[in-house]
Image (cartoon, rainbow, N blue to C red):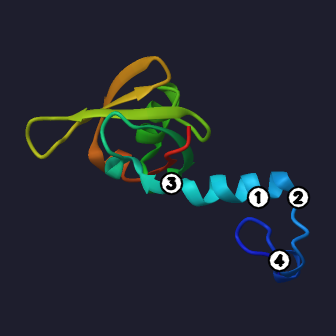
Amino acid sequence: MGGACGLTPHALSTGNLHPLLIINCIKAMDSVTVRLDQLPFRTPARVTAVAWDQLTPSEARRLRNLGLDEGVTVEALHGGPIGKDPLAVRIGRMMVAIRRAHAHVITVDDQP
């Protein structure tokens, strides 16, 4: 069985490793997956998943209309004055305000 990045015990023991496999494993180890509401401010990240089923149809439609979907680059810019809500987020070249509850269902990878 291979590990998270495809390395097998046999490949490790024989030293028979393809250079691209090694590079992909290093990249996989360096990336961190977090929710958008946990992302440090001013850190660009790529959306890896959105739990659309945890949003109402109108909330999901609004986020999609703003361009938020898997694969998009986002960046949390700053939080509001009370409870850090709403959250100012850059989606592409646009800055929008979304609620922390909505940011909570968005999973991002810090490797944009």
Q: Amino acid at mark 1?
A: Ile
Q: Earlier in the sequence, mark 2 or mark 4?
A: 4
Q: Position of residue 112 (x, y in %)?
A: 56, 37
Q: CA distance from mark 2 to mark 4?
A: 12 Å
Q: CA distance from mark 2 to mark 1?
A: 7 Å
Q: Earlier in the sequence, mark 4 or mark 1?
A: 4
The residue pinned by badge 1 equals 22
Which residue is painted at 87% across and 64% down in the image? 17
Mark 2 in CB contact with mark 1 (< 8 angstroms) = yes
Which residue is painted at 76% across and 58% down in the image? 22
The residue pinned by badge 2 equals 18
78 over 111 or under it: above or below: above
Q: Earlier in the sequence, mark 3 or mark 4?
A: 4
Which residue is painted at 54% across and 43% down in the image? 47
Q: CA distance from mark 1 to mark 3?
A: 32 Å
Q: CA distance from mark 2 to mark 3?
A: 36 Å
Residue found at the very far left of the displayed protein: 82
Residue found at the very far front of the displayed protein: 15
Instruction: Write down the quadrant of residue 16 in the picture.
Output: bottom right
The residue pinned by badge 3 equals 51
Q: Amino acid at mark 2?
A: His
Nearer to us of marks 2 and 3 is 2
Q: Earlier in the sequence, mark 1 or mark 3?
A: 1
93 over 34 or under it: above or below: above
Nearer to us of marks 2 and 4 is 2
The residue pinned by badge 4 equals 8
Q: CA distance from mark 4 to mark 1?
A: 12 Å
